[in-house]
Image (cartoon, helix red, strand yellow):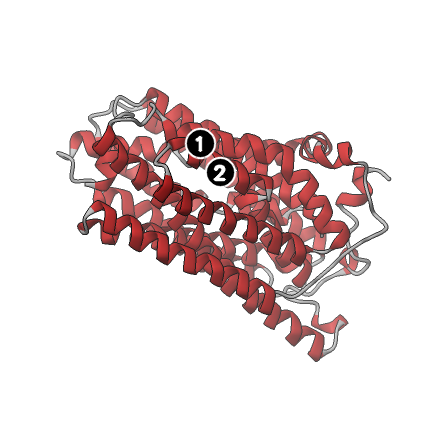
Amino acid sequence: MSMQDTEVSPPADAATETSPLLPRAEVNDASSNNRTRNLCKLCLIASLYFLHREMYDQFISVYIILQQDINGQRPPSFRQYMDTLRVLLSLFTIGSWSHVADVWGRKPVMLISMIGTTISHLVFVQAEFIRKDFRVYVGSVALDCLFGGSIVSNGLLHTYIADCASPGSRFKLFSALKGFSMLFYFGGAELTMLPLILPAQEYFILLMIISSLVAVLNVVLIISLLPETLRSPARKLPILKAVISPATVFTQRPWVTLALLVYSLTPNFGVVKMWFGIIFSDGTFSWYSIFPHAASTFALLLLYPTVAILYQRKPRPLQSVLRFTRRLAYTCLSLDFFSTVTVISIAASNRIAHLVFAAISPFTVAIAPAIYSSVPSHSAVLFGSFSVIDALGDMFSVCGAFFISPLSDSFPRMCLS
């Protein structure tokens, strides 16, 4: 069976769907209410997952920096190296895990991924007290990725929404999911930074306990609340085809995936804009950092879902909704590219110009949700491939930004000050 059959296969009602929300005219109230409850459960699980993921990653970053202060043993650009390892390992695992999710169900893979993340975290915690070695972190990241990791989980969360909502209503839900991820990533980072007033050893112990409890709670919620959705046991693929599915998706949908890759290269240029703020604001850059994140979260949680609802107030054919999301994605992508190139081209000392174009950036965050919702598919392979392509571009962006930055060695430490 071809990847095309596995990937798209929209439901029979998708081609004629005209309802802007869940297709209430085509299902009974009980089914519609069940979908709403499933989305609420998914929202709770996703929020807690994003919180734990950022707490875990931020804790590791702080740990590395503090250990450098104590021992002076951190290799150069260690965090960038580990992020690269995470993405490269995920390239070889996401296709297989996503295919398993399509064949045997989403919940088992989501549970396995979260258990793997929990085990990798607990391995790091235990090994930290036995042997303080950065190779422990390398092993924990590798273990996390072998079980799927954050990239597979991100793809599965989008797949769950695709299962629980009609194709015409996905854009606002994908936007809200992205907004929740930004909100709880920020919350996890702040929770990790608050106890820094404690001595280093007490800080490590407290954060290890809190993060471990949140990880275990994630597993409990997935087991008890997460519903099972679609599964297709007849759609088995050879292992090799499953592994290379991201490349197959790219060849089948080159323009959509290329747009997602290009977009994922640009958000971290916000870091470049932050450097301008650091250099020309005497180091007082907290407000400069918080503004784009807060504005982007607002746009994803309120602005773009409202735009989708207003556009869909009158029943429209599904193809009209898909054209709307594609045009929105390409328009925002053009705006994002223009503002990024302009910021880099303008003289660094022109702070007002940088502020203007930095203010434009939050309004381009609809690109990824629009691209995810532009294909009426229920395939975990498709959304998993989108997720790893997004992460791949983000990796190139971070590596490139830190490579060209004169502050690359001191930037992480400045973020802790």
Q: Is residue 15 left or right of residue 308?
A: right
Q: At 29% from the left edge and 38% from the top edge, which residue is drawn?
A: 356
Task: Give coordinates of residue 248: x percent, y percent.
Answer: 72, 32
Q: Nearer the viewer, mark 2 or mark 1?
A: 2
Report the disc number at residue 141.
2
Asked whether the viewer can see residue 366, the reply is yes
| Position of the C terminus by quadrant | top left
Q: Is 168 displayed left or right of 75 in the figure?
A: right
Residue for point 70% across, 50% down: 101
Q: Which mark is residue 170?
A: none
The amino acid sitting under disc 1 is Met
Query: In the picture provided, is 36 more to the left or to the right than 177?
Result: right
In front: 363, or 401? 401
Q: Are marks 2 and 1 in contact (CB under 8 Å)?
A: yes
Disc tally is: 2
Helix or strand or loop: what does disc 1 sit on? helix
Q: Which mark is residue 82?
A: 1
Residue 271: percent from the left, percent from the top? 33, 34
x and y, in percent, of residue 104 in the image: 75, 54
